Amino acid sequence: MSSDDAAARLRELRREPPRFRRVRVRSITPLSTRMLRVVLGGDELDGFAIEAPASSVRMLLPPPGGDQLVMPTWTGNQFELPGGERAPIRTFTPRAFDAVRRELTIDVVLHDHGVATDWARGATIGDEVAISGPGRSEHLDPDARSHLLVGDESALPAIGQLLEAIPPDQSIDVHVEISSRDARLRLPAHPGATVAWHDAAAGAPPGDSVVEAVMKLDELADAVWVAGEAASVQRLRRYLFDERDRSRRSVTARGYWKLD
Ligand SMILES: Cc1cc2nc3c(=O)[nH]c(=O)nc-3n(C[C@H](O)[C@H](O)[C@H](O)COP(=O)(O)OP(=O)(O)OC[C@H]3O[C@@H](n4cnc5c(N)ncnc54)[C@H](O)[C@@H]3O)c2cc1C
């Protein structure tokens, strides 16, 4: 390998993400037929902290079909299992953390099928997973007086945290797409919040109902936060920039998952 190739290869390598902390399931509580609250605990959570709402953690799960956690190796681009397969890692919102009990709460959407959703459906007390993070958080715009929060079920944990973090004298307009009526959750109370639940229309792309709802709004809030299926988030982002002239600074848009 020439020194140029070696330099190029080094540039391609990404810095190893924060270490994994091994934890065990301490409790599992259904929040709705579509969401499970999983509390994970263990001494390795010592020093973990959630500094701002809507951050993320990476959860390493046992390989599909197995129940034993296998620790992966960082190759410079991804975490791999000993057999060379990509490690089963998914991203979640650290919904709450109890530093005294060293317990981290994660709310997992039960969609049709996936490594994390299948794991959560079958999880029992004592099962082991590992957590890395937290990563990037949402720092609220100190100048905003009003907020528009838009998302789907995967964004509900982050929306819950944002509702808790936004000062009570500010207004919040929340729009959430749900795949069935019983996916509604009791969200944290906020004196300035209104919450609209939108049923996903059969056959429509995910997120369509909330994109439509935002397009119908006469006035937009000072700060807009959007998360959910990546294509719908991108559609809304483009709409806000191109049709509503929003500044980049006033819009936070995050793809939380990709269709297929
Ligand atoms: C910053 C961040 C925070 C997140 N926070 C949460 C959270 O708190 N709770 C949570 O449940 N999710 C959250 N997500 C989304 C979660 O990471 C994805 O939904 C993930 O794909 C789920 O993994 P899986 O193994 O169940 O499905 P995968 O194996 O990744 O996907 C399998 C199939 O399921 C589909 N799929 C994936 N997710 C969904 C979904 N939500 N609804 C419908 N179909 C889906 C995919 O299109 C694919 O066809 C977050 C994502 C990010 C980036």
Image (cartoon, rainbow, N blue to C red):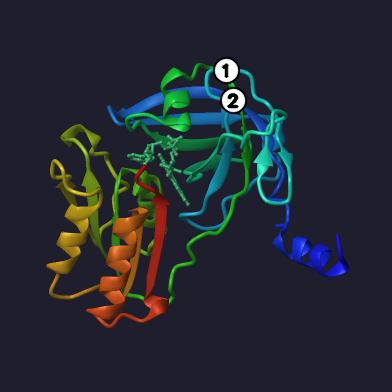
Could you tell me which residue is drawn at 42 percent across and 30 percent down?
117
Q: Is residue 32 above or below residue 127?
A: below
Q: Quadrant of ligand 1?
A: top left
Q: Residue furthest front?
A: 1
Which quadrant: the C terminus? top left
Residues under numbered marks 2 and 1 in contact, where contact means CB atoms less than 8 Å apart: yes
The image quadrant of residue 8 is bottom right
Residue 1 pos. (x, y %): 86, 59
Residue 155 at what x, y percent from top left? 36, 49
**Which residue is denoted by mark 1 in the rendering?**
66
What amino acid does circle 2 point to?
Pro
Q: Residues within 10 Å of mark 2 (few under 14, many from 20)?
A: many
Packing grade of label 1 (10 A; few <14, some 14-19, many >=20) is few
For residue 51, above or below residue 146: above
Q: Residue at x 83, y 63 (%)?
A: 6
Horizontal side of 36 relative to 92 (left or right) equals left
The answer, for residue 170, to whether it is visible in the render is no
Q: Report the residue marked by disc 2.
A: 62
Give me the C-alpha separation between circle 2 and circle 1. Answer: 6 Å
Front-most of residues 12 and 217: 12
